[in-house]
Image: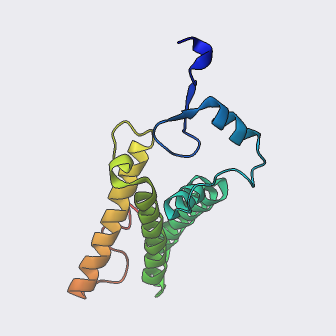
Amino acid sequence: PSMDAMPFLSPDRENGHVGYVPVSTVDEERAMSPSKRTKKPFSYSDLGLEVIRNKRFQGAMALLITLNALVIGFETDMPHWPIWNEVENTFLFIFSLEFLLRICCVGPREYFRYTNQDFSWNTIDFIVVGLGLFDFATIQILSFRKKGSGFATLFR
């Protein structure tokens, strides 16, 4: 058969499918207005990825990390303030939610994949949040705590 008679195939990456579709179908779909294109089914994972990759979200998390560092500094200078534990636990809760969002959306295999460009930061996040949660759980279980901070506060 001649090349003109054979349908050319194009990867169907845009719709998230594995396989190929005829080029004419891809071109026709791209030519359509965005509202008429075939839409992917709604996915919480995709929504979460959009949130994680959003510059405002990343900026807000960077601001929270900076504020947490300032709080740790103030806590060192003013250990008598009675609300430090609540402030620390609020930061831990927010950082834990962010960690869970990343794990759920990216998946644990990709999150901890050595070739992932964010592997180092992901590992640090895992260690820091894990230590914070361990510190929190230990304190809750033992119900014993001196005024001041736990051993993992320095790492958070």
In this view, the residue in front, 91 or 25, is: 25
Residue 4: x percent and y percent? 62, 15
Numbered marks: total = 0
- Please name the residue shown 40% across and 58% down the image: 103
Colouring chosen for the image of the structure: rainbow
**Residue at image coords 34%, 43%:** 113
Q: Does residue 142 lie above or below 68 as drawn? A: below
Can you give x and y, in whole percent of width and height, for residue 60 in the image? 62, 62
62 with respect to 156 (left or right): right
Q: Is residue 140 above or below residue 28?
A: below
Q: Name the residue: 75% across, 55% down.
A: 35
**Residue 75 percent coordinates (x, y):** 47, 74
- Which residue is farthest top? 2
Residue 127 versus residue 143: which sits nearer the camera?
A: 127
In the displayed structure image, the side of residue 89 where residue 10 appears, left or right: right
Q: Quadrant of residue 46?
A: bottom right
In this rendering, is residue 60 above or below 1?
below
Q: Is residue 75 left or right of residue 27?
A: left
Which residue corresponds to the image point at 39% horizontal and 43% vertical from the top-left? Answer: 119
Residue at far left of view: 142
Which corner quadrant holds the C terminus?
A: bottom left
Question: Of residues 10 and 6, which is closer to you in this image?
Answer: 6
